[in-house]
Amino acid sequence: MGASFAGTKPGILNPLAISVLFSGIIESHRNPRTDTASLMSDPAHPLEVYLVGGAVRDEIMGRRIQDRDWLVVGSTPQEMIGLGFRPLGSNFPVFLHPITREEYALARTERKISRGYHGFEFNSDPGITLEQDLSRRDLTMNAMAKDREGNVIDPWGGCKDIRKGVIRHVSDAFREDPVRVLRVARFAARYRDDGFEVDPGTLELMSKMVEEGEVDALVAERVWQELERSLAEPGCSHFLGILRRCGALEKILPEVDALFGIPQTEKFHPEIDTGIHVQMSLDAATRISDDSMVRFAVMVHDLGKALTPAQELPRHRGHERRGIRPIRQLCDRIGVPARYREFALKVCQYHLHCHRMVQLKPATVLKVLEAFDGFRKPELIEKFSLACLADKRGRTGHENDSDEPMQLLNRYHRAAMAVDAGKIAAACHASVGSRSHCGPGIRKKIRRERIAAIRAIRDHRTKTGQPG
């Protein structure tokens, strides 16, 4: 089935967009001049320059262009530096434009010399052609270029694949870079709702890369980078699905892969399979939050279910405690930032408390709020409630379940936050006359007042006959 996009027909270029593509310098400086003199003052003017990659793809798809990358054919590092471009490192022939700060790369070819992401030798000889450079790129949709006149150069059929809704590799050279397995999964997550599918031949090639151990050479930094970017995509659950189909999920995120095939009690989880539940929860998360930290916590909140003893299945008593170790293991292995890690651990440990919020004692509610440092970082309570709501709605037939427990948590939080800790401290200091003797007493008094505020909310609900 073909893909569809808003704003333009697939493959038909917007004339207005074409007219401004090569006025990037002027646009970047918010200067509307497009006269010949201003263009001649562009240090890139003497060069054979093409707009390449994502900017061309996004324009053809009618999407907002995020970044512009430029390709220079027939030049040398010496010429680029002489024109005022600043080299970026020594590994790649990439330069920063002296005015726009956009990246300009010399056309190059690559040769695989060892396993992994860094195992390449580059050739940026001035004789490298545009087509040769495009041939080394990962996907046909990313292997297009546009010249100064607005003509699209598309030797690998990227426009056709975009119209058909196909994510396809350019050539067999795809297998030389294991990061491309993650990138395909990420693009599949980005364009899932547009009807895109990964080409069967590309999936087969990805599977061979897994079988040959190429994916084992992925470095933690790139795994986390691609995972985090995928979590921001509208179809982030599809990232896991594509990796699983080619066998890479078991290698990259084995703790998540282990959830597939683990049964749950059908009464509470009609979808039964825990892996499916995690994907459905991620889908629910995308509908209520664009926060990648919330989505990461949703992805790992049930890792403990893969460790449930077989004789206890399909029940999962204590899975929230068993999930702590695999979350730490996953985070340590791929270098997940501390704020993601700590939040995910707390969501795992306390998500059942949120679902049972109506039944919790006031002191237990306060324990949850304190666990998230909710009085210094109140935004974490809102994030926690969103993660729990995604978990609640990530079940077959429960996609529109009420958010009542989460709303109650937020009401409890607001009531406890309203307790004036400063006033309590001042009263203690006034009565005792010494700050050194007040510390423990102040903390106890504040906790008592917060518990009382939570209890008042609970008692009012009971008195007025509200649900629960």
Image (cartoon, rainbow, N blue to C red):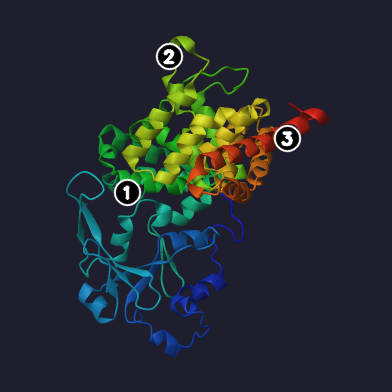
Image mark count: 3
The residue carrying mark 2 is 309
Q: Residue at x 32, y 47 (%)?
A: 221
What is the number of the mark on residue 333? none
The residue carrying mark 3 is 456
**Depicted 442 relative to depicted 43: above or below:** above
Image quadrant holding the C terminus, namely top right
Q: Residue at x 48, y 53 (%)?
A: 160
Q: Is residue 16 left or right of residue 207?
A: right
Q: Closest to the observer: 16 or 188?
A: 188
User: Which amino acid does the dot numbered 3 rest on?
Assistant: Ala
For the residue carrying disc 3, how many other residues have a C-alpha within 10 Å: few (<14), some (14-19), or many (20+)? Answer: some
The residue carrying mark 1 is 171
The answer to whether residue 194 shows anywhere in this view is: no
User: Which amino acid does the dot numbered 2 rest on?
Assistant: Pro
Q: Are marks 1 and 2 in contact (CB under 8 Å)?
A: no
Q: Are marks 3 and 2 in contact (CB under 8 Å)?
A: no
Q: Are marks 3 and 1 in contact (CB under 8 Å)?
A: no
Q: Pinpoint residue 287: horizontal percent, then vertical percent.
A: 61, 43
User: In the image as oriented, which residue stretches furthest toward the top?
Assistant: 311
User: Which amino acid does the dot numbered 1 rest on?
Assistant: Ser
The answer to whether residue 456 shows anywhere in this view is: yes
Q: Closest to the observer: 230 or 135?
A: 230
Callout 2: helix, strand or loop? loop
